[in-house]
Image (cartoon, rainbow, N blue to C red):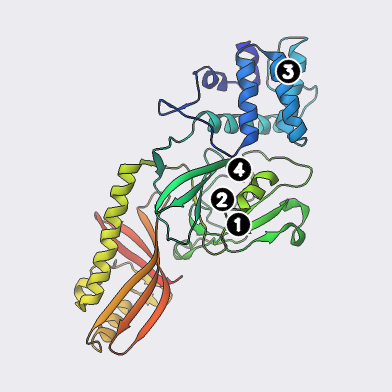
Amino acid sequence: MHQFLRALLGGLALLLACGPLTVFGAEISRAPGGDADAALGAVFKDIEQSRLSSALEKIDALLVGYPNFRLAHLIRGDLLLARARPLVSFGNPQDAPADKLADLRDEAIARLKAYRNRPPSNYVPRYLLQMEPEQKYAIVVDTQRSRLYIYQNDNGRPRFVADYYITHGKLGAEKAREGDKRTPVGVYHVTANLPRQKLSDFYGSGAFPISYPNEWDRQQGRDGHGIWLHGTPSDTYSRPPRASDGCVVLTNRDLDALSSYMQIGLTPVIISNTIEWLSVDDWASERRSLNNQIEDWRKDWESRDVDRYLAHYSKNFRNSEGGYEQWARQKRLVSASKNWVKVDLGKLSVFRSPGKQDLIVVTFEQDYRSNNLSNVLKKRQYWLKEGGRWKIVYEGFA
């Protein structure tokens, strides 16, 4: 019967033969979310253990709940054919398009790998260093695994809630240009909720646009628009892992579930090629270190020692008004008119940006007071590690 499984999913048979559901050697239980994945896992377990009749019953039950699930239909067809003759490939309908079968095989592998290899409860994504108190949830997307994870803000610590299969760009990740059919990598936020009634059927049950390109993308010359989290057409349950023009696509059921976690303008969406996981202890240590860096910057601003304050800024600093030299001149001019300065930072969020650079995105509500000016502004900074030290390379209004 392993021969059938090997025909069904090729090299993935080895993964299925590795024993109980484990991650980093620790057996874990299935958390909410991804019901179709759990059902498929039960089907493959039956196949592995030569229980074809049970597998067929389970796939039939799955199709009752998910009648447009093409992958499940294909597996059902193979299970029926296996009663009559040996199978030598995945997907045995005569004259079936090879590209469609390859897409379904890729989806099966992505779903089952994610179901079999899940992050342990004492590990968190490295990127979620600090959510502000009003941010109830955060979304982290792993394009390599075709997976979206939801984390709850539990008094500052991210706690796993659910995960879902997703589709991303046809040509992968790291979007740089309009029309390149890639999904962006970086730290973004949900900007709107577009209901089904305002969209064509292509987007399914709705869409959530995100803030691509962000400030750093524009600094790096990246462009494009219209990157959304959205659903699938009414006649389609799910799409292959790489099938969008850059958007993150979920099944309509999963998008509906995801919508209950969304806060427009607040919910962070962090998209990565592959997620870096940290133990809770390592995460807490990195968070503490970065918060200390931000606090040092705040104190040096209050000190009115302009050289100490400017030492936190990169010579490559740039914002909408110019570069480092212009920034430094402005700060020296402003400081000369101050007898005292008080700066408080509220609603602080700190997210590490995925990618090759050590980049941190810091957003806060700045309560600034001095002898001749008081205001409250929402600000965003990007900190980049240069020569082993964190330096601010962008600062502006959020």
Q: Which residue is mark 2?
A: 183
Q: Is residue 92 visible?
A: no
Horizontally, residue 145 falls left or right of residue 27, namely right
Q: Where residue 227 is drawn, which disc sits there? A: 1
For mark 1, does the 10 Å Cα neighbourhood hold few (<14), some (14 to 19), or many (20 or more) residues? many
For mark 3, does the 10 Å Cα neighbourhood hold few (<14), some (14 to 19), or many (20 or more) residues? many
CB contact under 8 Å: marks 1 and 2: yes
Q: Which residue is mark 3?
A: 79
For mark 4, does the 10 Å Cα neighbourhood hold few (<14), some (14 to 19), or many (20 or more) residues? many
Q: Earlier in the sequence, mark 1 or mark 2?
A: 2
Q: Secondary structure at mark 1?
A: loop
Quarter of the figure with residue 264: bottom right
Rounded to the nearest whole Å, what is the CA distance between mark 1 and mark 4?
14 Å
Q: Where residue 166 is drawn, which disc sits there? A: 4
Rounded to the nearest whole Å, what is the CA distance between mark 1 and mark 2?
8 Å
Of residue 301 and residue 89, the one placed in the foreground of this image is 301
